[in-house]
Amino acid sequence: MAKKIEGEMSFLEHLEIMRWHLLRSLAAIIIFALVAFVFKDIVFDTIILAPKEPGFPTNRWLCQLGDLLGLKRICINQDPFSLQTVKMAEQFSMHIIVSMISRSSSMMFPS
């Protein structure tokens, strides 16, 4: 067997380090997904569905621009609307999916 050079790791030592990285990553994903699941009102109402409200800044700016340019057609979302689900358990499954996605996006775009 070849003599081990100082600082080198065996294949099993690499696997052990990778295992701990995977376990910590999985724990972080689960914890942050649970936090997003618990604070669903903030995630859905403030972040995801905010553009559907007439008071959303982009909707107001488009209306102001439309008034300046005489284009009433770019003034969108002035009538509030509600969303309707048509499949059974769709709201709950969407809640779970968004919780997982919100964790993934917080990993990609750290603050």
Image: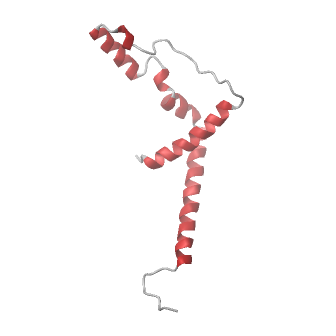
In which quadrant of the rendered view does residue 91 lie?
top right
Give the percent coordinates (x, y) of residue 58: 38, 22
What colour scheme has been applied to the protein in the rendered image? secondary structure
Rendered location of residue 100, percent (x, y): 57, 44
Q: Residue at x 54, y 57 (%)?
A: 25
Q: Residue furthest front?
A: 1
Against 21, residue 3 (above or below) is below
Indicate the quadrant where residue 75 lies.
top left
Residue at 59% x, 21% y is: 83
Residue 63 spot, x, y in % from top left:
36, 13
| Residue in the picture at 51% in, 14% down | 80
Residue 60, above or below 7: above
In this view, 63 is above or below 86: above
Residue positioned 62% across, 39% down in the render: 96
Above or below residue 77? Residue 45 is below
Q: How many labels does the image show?
A: 0
Measuring from the top left, give residue 22's x and y in whole percent. Answer: 56, 61
Outermost residue toward the left in this view: 68
